[in-house]
Amino acid sequence: MSKEIKLIALDLDGTLVKYGEDLISKENLMAIKSAQDAGVEVVIATGRSRATSLKIGQQLGVRYMINVNGGEIWTTEGELLHRHPLDQETVKQIIEIQSQYSVFSWFVSNDQIFRNELPADYLDREWLKMGFNVEDDHVRDEMIRQFSQMDSVELSNSSLTNMELNPKGVHKASAIEYLLDRLALSFDQVMAVGDSINDLKMIEAAGIGVAMGNAQDTVKEVADWETVSYDVNGVAVAIEKFVLGSN
């Protein structure tokens, strides 16, 4: 591939950093800084909220952060560029399905994250993403079946045992498209790197889609190239190969 990359979209958990952590390896950090020095825009594209990803964004010195799978786009300086919440009827349907099961849940509003609880005024709040972690395969399959029948949600995951729900059409690829319009770039100039189903559409859309060595099989199947795992600096390997021309 000889495409000229002008924007790199990076997932966080299981891609740039260990799941739930903020420590960026020296190798990944150096590769990202070298790409930025070469004029490449680096963007975070994560299922995390702004609050739980801002530290990484600031450490990388990026300008833009795609959060909650595309439900929000922020600048690291705190300007909200775009927000797309779930509608009230969809929230009711999600909660009705969730109430049938005893599973770990997290609900991301525009100003707070609730874990295993919903506030009494939940229908008056603005919800960006709802997620569930389900260890039981049968229960998980049944919940996925029910959520898949809803035409108002975008169903993805960030691990093999969870599921994440955003408004239909809201995903990392649609958020990247918003930024590409702002930056006068095209998807052909994008390298997207990720490991889970919530990365699938951006990897498919990108000029170069990279799956981590630890990625889910479905992600590897659509990627243009597979790098090594996150714990051996797979992001740096991909940047060196396709952006810096080291390999």
Image: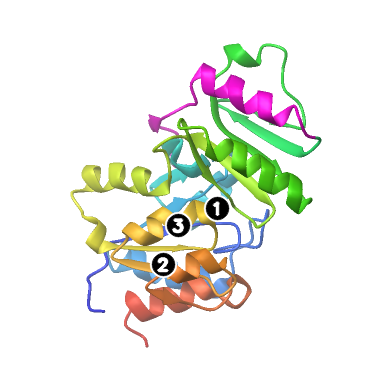
Q: Secondary structure at mark 3?
A: helix
* Mark 2 surroundings: few (<14), some (14-19) or many (≥20) residues within 10 A: some
Instruction: List the single residue furthest toward the bottom.
Output: 247
Instruction: List the single residue furthest toward the left.
Output: 184
Q: Secondary structure at mark 2?
A: helix
Q: Which residue is mark 1?
A: 56
Q: Is residue 23 above or below residue 245?
A: above
- Give the mark nearer the N terminus: 2 vs 3: 3
Q: Which residue is mark 3?
A: 200
Colour setting: rainbow
Amino acid type, residue under disc 2 in the picture? Val
Quote the CA–CA distance across marks 2 and 3: 8 Å
Amino acid type, residue under disc 1 in the picture? Ile
Q: Are marks 2 and 3 in contact (CB under 8 Å)?
A: yes
Quote the CA–CA distance across marks 3 and 1: 22 Å
Amino acid type, residue under disc 3 in the picture? Leu
Q: Secondary structure at mark 1?
A: helix
Q: Residue at x 75, y 49 (%)?
A: 138
What numbered label is drawn on residue 141? none
Q: Residue 97: which quarter of the image?
A: top right
Instruction: Measuring from the top left, give residue 92's x and y in whole percent.
Output: 60, 19
Q: What stretch of residues is rendered in magenta?
A: 76-101
* Mark 3 surroundings: few (<14), some (14-19) or many (≥20) residues within 10 A: many
Is residue 96 in the magenta section?
yes
In the image shown, does 182 or 193 lie closer to the viewer?
A: 193
Q: Residue 193: which quarter of the image?
A: bottom left
Q: Residue at x 22, y 44 (%)?
A: 181
What numbered label is drawn on residue 222? 2
Q: Are marks 1 and 2 in contact (CB under 8 Å)?
A: no
* Mark 1 surroundings: few (<14), some (14-19) or many (≥20) residues within 10 A: many
